[in-house]
Image (cartoon, rainbow, N blue to C red):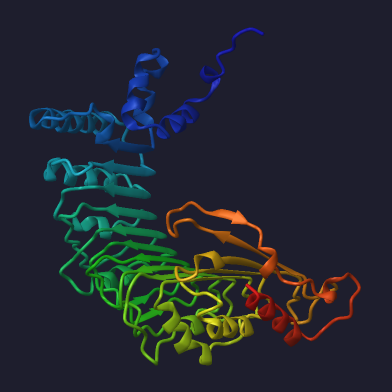
Amino acid sequence: MPNIDRISNLHDHLLQHILSLLDSREAVRTCLLSKRWKKLWVGMHSLDLNICNFKTQTSWFQRSERITSFQRFVNMLLSRRDPSDLHTFRLFCQDYNVSDLLITAWTFYALRFNAKVIEMTHLNYTMLPADIFTCASIEELYLDISEIGIGIVAVGVNLPRLRKLHLYDVFSGNNGILRELLSGCPALEELKLDECKLDISVISSPQLKYLHIYSGLDMARIESIRAPNLVSLDLQLLGDELCAANFEEMPFLANVSITVFDGTGFDAKCRIISACPNVRNLKLHGRVMRDLLSTELPKCPTFFNLRKLQLYELCRTCHGDLVDGMLEHSPNLKKLELRTRCHPLLNSQISVANISSQGAPSQSATNWSARTATESQLGAGATSSAPLPDMIAPKPDPSTIPGAPSVPVSDTLNDIMAGMREL
């Protein structure tokens, strides 16, 4: 078969799209391939500027050379690029002392050419230009800042097209910074806060669909979440940030994962789980989650849509009343996972099958199976699956035979609980 140069047959705009998927330094190097490739890179619509792609240096003098080479390259690239709109602008400085003035100039370049996606990572930087918070073209904004932090100038935030906002290790002396950001982003659908030092007591965003919060040591308490269109909630908190939370009802919330690493308990007026009546997948992790269940179970609705329930730091032996309470509120549950440190050999994953959405069992009625996953060291990541020992294996239920008469759903739940007690 003859060798065919298929790449050369592609149109320039396709080749420029391919170059946009590469690191910008590698893309510029393609100018050596042929005369046609000499200026293809100048039409790229995505720029990926990463100081790590320059030679690794060790001494202070070599690090200084690396910074100088990186700054010279970025200046050359931006000065020779075609004056056309950008799609993506990524800047990764890995905590090197890149000139503040140059970072400001590069940021203004991205804004001038209407970048839709801006990602700025690991900057030893104290101030971003205020224009980044009033750019009408930005649809996705990712700010990953070093420990020195960032003072966000958020006066008059106006990001009408912003759909995704990710902030990492961002802090501000302005306690209302997050509220100003959210009020200036009417189309925001995804918010992610990792180790930020911000006032997050009230999170209000009518169009928000995805919310992820991983707390730093200085994160304020979460008092209220007002996001009626939320579909996914992931909270990983260190202490008492949730102890007095009162969430407004979120009817579309389907996936909930809450991890609290430490804490003293929850206020009697706390409303978290009960604000998610239509949840499909629920994960609760942390010892204080027992207090949350004790507080909220009496006022929880029936979770008719709940299919998967994960309860970590709870076991059937020590917390049977809480597990039973959740099962009673989950008539259509398909899978239950229990993991605990107090009885690691009883860690289990229960599949509860064939319970119809109307609450009545199907033909195979209460057919369910259990398998245990034992861990030699809980939390080490190595998990081995093993069958239940004969001495604790659940006895087969005659109702699992095809064609057996139907039983009330209450009997079905009782059978499930009885089987779990044998674990």
- Residue at horizontal 37 percent and vertical 83 percent from the top: 245
Q: Is residue 110 left or right of residue 129?
A: right
Q: Toward which corner of the image does residue 130 lie, by quadrant?
A: bottom left
Residue 63 locus on image (x, y percent): 13, 32
Residue 371 locus on image (x, y percent): 65, 62
Q: Residue furthest front?
A: 391
Q: Taking 133 as reference, is 118 above or below it?
A: above
Q: Residue furthest right?
A: 403
Q: Is residue 144 left or right of residue 227?
A: left
Instruction: Give 380 or 395, whichever is nearer the viewer.
Output: 395
Q: How many marks?
A: 0
Residue 411 locus on image (x, y percent): 75, 85
Query: Can residue 404 be seen from the camera position used here?
Result: yes
Q: Is residue 417 left or right of residue 74?
A: right
- Residue at horizontal 45 percent and vertical 89 percent from the top: 295
Quadrant for the N terminus in the image:
top right
Q: Taking 304 as reference, is 130 above or below it?
A: above
Quadrant for the C terminus in the image:
bottom right
Q: Toward which corner of the image does residue 182 lie, by quadrant?
A: bottom left
Instruction: Give 258 or 48, whichever is nearer the viewer.
Output: 258
Query: Can residue 138 be seen from the camera position used here?
Result: no
Q: Taking 388 as reference, is 205 above or below it?
A: below
Q: Residue furthest left?
A: 61
Q: Taking 411 as reference, is 420 above or below it?
A: above
Q: Is residue 65 left or right of residue 162?
A: left
- Residue at horizontal 45 percent and vertical 81 percent from the top: 290
Residue 161 locus on image (x, y percent): 40, 60
